[in-house]
Image (cartoon, rainbow, N blue to C red):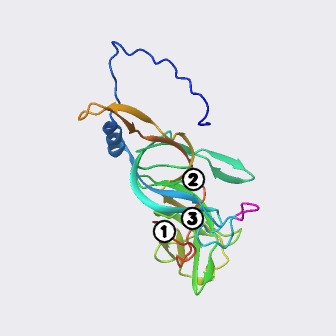
């Protein structure tokens, strides 16, 4: 809006004889704290490694890992989440999870597009294939999500042999999303796994990114603008964007 344009003031509505109604911010915040899910929120930044000409991230960037986004400042907080679902869409013989969820958070926990939300209070089941490789004498594979509990893991032998069930502690160990195998000969084999993990979402829309309301101060009697909770829509992740390697050297921590 140009500062030189004339602004026409609309005639205000009459409030004579009308009762005043004020929102109570403390009740909103208390509801989120008492009834909300415990989460880890990570703020998303577009990585500055992008090429100016084509806006493509550099694949060897240790800030974003080549994905174009940096996730920093992990914050433990609470949010209200509802309308959660786990729909799937079959495309090109692959399963892409497109479940969405409505998120309400306090104004202090600001959300923006692509912010990452990990739900600590919940868990869900996922299944995938693992392809072990041997590096520096260790045979391991990465799961898409950090594993809470393995339901079952099987090794494919051949088409005429039953799958071989692998046992935790005896055949493999788990550390977050790294599965380390005791038997180095599993390098090049195919493993199928079913496990529990914490749900992960990325913010895709913010229908209400600001909500303020004038509230009369009990101490001064004057109107004060209070900022109320934010409402966002997040989508279920079907892959981890900021996956770290076994040595913890793939990504740099830019938190401040």
Q: Is residue 137 above or below residue 54?
A: below
Where residue 220 appears, as percent x and y from the top left, is 25, 34
Residue occupying the far top of the picture: 17
- Whether residue 53 is in magenta: the answer is yes
**Badge nearest the viewer, 2 or 3:** 2
Please state the extent of the stretch shown in magenta in the rendering: 51-56
Residue occupying the far front of the picture: 4
Residue at x-position 48% and y-position 72%: 175
Instruction: Tell me the tag on residue 114.
Output: 2
Give me the C-alpha separation between circle 1 and circle 2. 23 Å
Where residue 53 appears, as percent x and y from the top left, is 76, 62
Instruction: Tell me the tag on residue 6.
Output: none
Instruction: Residue under label 1, please give it.
Output: 176
**Is residue 145 or residue 63 the one in the foreground?**
63
Mark 3 vs mark 1: which is more N-terminal? 1
Is 89 positioned to the left or the right of 86 in the image?
right
Q: Is residue 30 above or below residue 192?
A: above
Q: Are marks 2 and 3 in contact (CB under 8 Å)?
A: no
Instruction: Tell me the tag on residue 242.
Output: 3
- Pointer 1 local density, CA inside 10 Å: few below 14, some 14–19, many at least 20: few
Q: Is residue 153 above or below residue 89?
A: below
């Amino acid at each position: 809006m140009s500062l030189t344009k004339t602004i026409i003031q609309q005639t205000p509505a009459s409030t004579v004889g009308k009762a005043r109604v004020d929102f109570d911010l403390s009740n909103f915040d208390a509801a989120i704290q008492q009834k909300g899910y415990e989460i880890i929120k990570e703020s998303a930044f577009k990585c500055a490694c992008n090429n100016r000409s084509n806006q493509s991230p550099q694949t060897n960037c240790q800030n974003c890992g080549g994905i174009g986004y940096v996730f920093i400042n992990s914050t433990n907080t609470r949010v209200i989440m509802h309308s959660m679902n786990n729909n799937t869409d079959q495309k090109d013989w692959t399963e892409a999870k497109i479940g969405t969820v409505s998120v309400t958070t306090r104004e202090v926990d600001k959300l923006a597009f692509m912010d990452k939300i990990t739900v600590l209070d919940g868990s869900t089941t996922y299944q995938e294939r693992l392809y072990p490789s041997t590096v520096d004498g260790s045979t391991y594979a990465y799961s898409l999500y950090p594993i809470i509990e393995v339901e079952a893991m099987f090794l494919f032998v051949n088409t005429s042999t039953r799958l071989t069930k692998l046992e935790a502690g005896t055949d493999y160990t788990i550390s977050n999303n790294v599965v380390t195998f005791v038997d180095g000969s599993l390098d090049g084999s195919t493993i199928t796994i079913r496990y529990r993990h914490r749900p992960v979402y990325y913010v895709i829309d913010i229908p209400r990114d600001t909500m303020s309301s004038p509230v009369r101060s009990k101490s001064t009697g004057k109107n004060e603008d209070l900022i109320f909770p934010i409402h966002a829509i997040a989508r279920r992740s079907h892959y981890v964007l900021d996956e770290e390697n076994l040595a913890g050297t793939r990504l740099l921590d830019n938190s401040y």
